[in-house]
Image: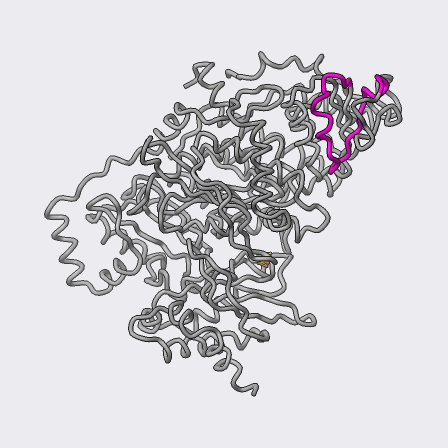
Amino acid sequence: MQTLTDTNLQIQSRYQLNVVGESENLILREQCCPVTQWRSDSEGSLRKVLITAGEDFSHLFDHLASLSHIVVEFPVFTDGRGFSTARELRERGYSGNLVAAGDFIVDQVDYLARCGFDTFEFSSKSLAEIARRKLNSNQEVYQGDALQPLPLFRRRRAAGVI
Amino acid sequence: MYQYDHIDQAIVDQRVIQFRDQTQRFLSGELASEAYQPLRLQNGLYIQRHAPMLRIAVPYGTLSSQQLRKLADISRRYDRSYAHVSTRQNFQFNWPELARVPDILAELAGVQMHAIQTSGNCIRNITTDELAGVALGERLDPRPICEILRQWSTLHPEFAFLPRKFKIAITANPEDRAAILAHDVGIDLKVDTTSAGILADVYVGGGLGRTPIIGNLLKADLPVEHLITYLEALIRVYNQFGRRDNKYKARIKILVKATGLTEFAERVERAWDLLKGNPSTISAEEIERVSAHFALPDYRLPSEDEVKNYHDRLDSDALFSRWIERNTRRHKQEGHRIVYIPLKSHGLAPGDITADQMELVARLAEQYGYGIVRTTHQQNMVLPDINVASLYEVWQSLQTEQLAQPVLNTLNDMICCPGGDFCSLANAKSIPVAEAIQARFESFDFLYDLGPIELNISGCMNACGHHHIGHIGILGVDKKGREFFQVCLGGRQGREASVGKILGPSFEQERIPEIIEIILQTYIEHRANEETFIETYDRIGIDAFKEAVYADAH
Ligand code: SF4
């Protein structure tokens, strides 16, 4: 069967799946500046920012190119604000690492990835493994998203499916 | 109606596989029940008082006869040979077994159906006018836009964990049968007289529940191609700022109220600046592609003989003519009528339909109605396109399954939530109240004399039975562990939607039929000329009813 998404995804290299306390490249909270304290005149040490749900992050918008990591913390997995935060950051042109941290669950990784997250912090290796499998499976989707800006109705046309 | 292509099909099939995996992980203990809960809810699966309840999406209330047959079949093999039509036009099964739900979803996928986002804190199934495409006075057929929005909202990655559920209703008819003012978002479609394009008026913040609020106009004359990006901006603002600390204050209506409509509209505009014109802007080709699925059937005009025959029957058969008058409506196509099927049979809860009944309706749709069936907000069904030449046979067949009761729009055509018989949130059992009222007012002459009355019953403040917007609303309340019922009067739906007023202290269940009778007698005493119940109420106010009902207490 024809799938419209596989040419656009190179999953293996796209994502980092980190295990808290194990992975070397894990972004530690201590390295991040809380977004509430972040100022544009801050020095380069503040290229990493932590946003917790509900915090205003609009003062980052003019400086997104100077940031290397934005960690979005989920207080509980049912709190979906981080999905919109990620989406907006990507839509405003942020191209650095976008890290999902905190209490999200592995069943959310595909939506998180579609909202623009490329790095995930898990509490165990087995969860990271489940996430890897999920992110590897190509799923058809209707909407445009951070991975694929065109909604299905435009891809259908492009692929000549209709 | 819309037919899936292989991609639509793949999306639904993927979802079945995913849900099977989640359910297996839950049953094996690998997935905690708190984590499983929102996942199963997004697939329409509740855990109820006695068993799980599975809610199946009927997008904008349109079903094919084949789909209805499948529902009948599922009800026999996986449930207790009946199903329930909800006020949001969906189907519910009350007795499925959790472990078999993935199999049910697989069966549904086989007929292009699913249970995606029929519950949970996400964008729910989109509803519309049950007479879309066949109603007189319609500005345009809203179904293509409904389908485009169905696709957009299905498995939307950003909006699956909103503060609370999010319901959208759409109409394109001056007569609003979709209750757009009682939804989180209501969309009123119109034709732009200068460009012939479609415009949308977007209403926001309506909703019932604990804090009933009628929606407000947020954006007028939005060109329809911007509908998706505008809704994304609106829901994004809600997702970021809606309250999450108290589930009773988490609906968008509370945010709109707290922010103020003007300020809220400005925030949405600012969010929209970022999205407006992006590739999600609906293309003319897409509207055309989807609209082609809703082309009108090839209506056959009845012959002169057939028309004459029909009129002869009307003259000679009083029962038939009463059914035509009560349960059918004019169709925009000459030679056809719209047939309503009230799901208000004796011995069944309002909205319930047995497997035999489903099969009969499916057969009639196939044989006489271009294979299409609708479900309605009033928990009834509709055969939208019946040729007058077939009406007599349709009527006779419906009678064999008690589906021709001429009670449409009467007191006995009530809305009632599942209540304490099924729902674990209930304060009280609503179904026995509905039955007791129906039993008390059985005489058609009395019902017809009363004229159109909307009576709505909810088993608790969540208001699934829309009691606030019934002319007469009944609400189950808990009084020191006992089931009591509060009565409100004067609510209404449609464009003049308003919330009813509470009559006074609540009553024990046994007294409800008697109280309703006093209310009806008060109306009959006071009505002038041909006034309907609601007109009399508007003229005399609630006090006359209050005095009559609570007279004993003085
Ligand atoms: S109104 Fe209350 S009792 Fe009735 S179905 Fe809704 S939640 Fe349950």
The residue positioned 27% from the left and 56% from the top of the image is: B396
- Residue at the front extreme of this rendering: A41
Residue A55 part of the magenta-drawn span = yes
Q: Is residue B132 above or below residue B541?
A: above
Q: Residue B489: percent from the left, percent from the top?
A: 48, 68
Quarter holding the N terminus of chain B is top left
Q: Quadrant of residue B533?
A: bottom left
Question: Which range is magenta?
Answer: A43-68
Q: Residue B540: percent from the left, percent from the top?
A: 42, 75
Q: Residue B229: percent from the left, percent from the top?
A: 53, 30
Q: Foreground: B374 or A78?
A: A78
Whether residue B166 is visible here, answered yes or no, is yes
Q: Is residue A133 above or below residue B61?
A: above
The residue positioned 45% from the left and 51% from the top of the image is: B179
Quarter holding the C terminus of chain B is bottom right
Q: Is residue B329 above or below residue B318?
A: above
Tell whether B27 sits left or right of B279: right
Colouring used for the render: one colour
Whether residue B78 is visible here, answered yes or no, is no
Tell whether B435 sits left or right of B96: left
Residue B437 part of the magenta-drawn span = no
Q: Residue B418: percent from the left, percent from the top?
A: 54, 58
Q: Where's ligand 1: which quadrant?
A: bottom right
The residue positioned 42% from the left and 60% from the top of the image is: B344
The residue positioned 28% from the left and 36% from the top of the image is: B297
Q: Foreground: B276 or A21?
A: B276
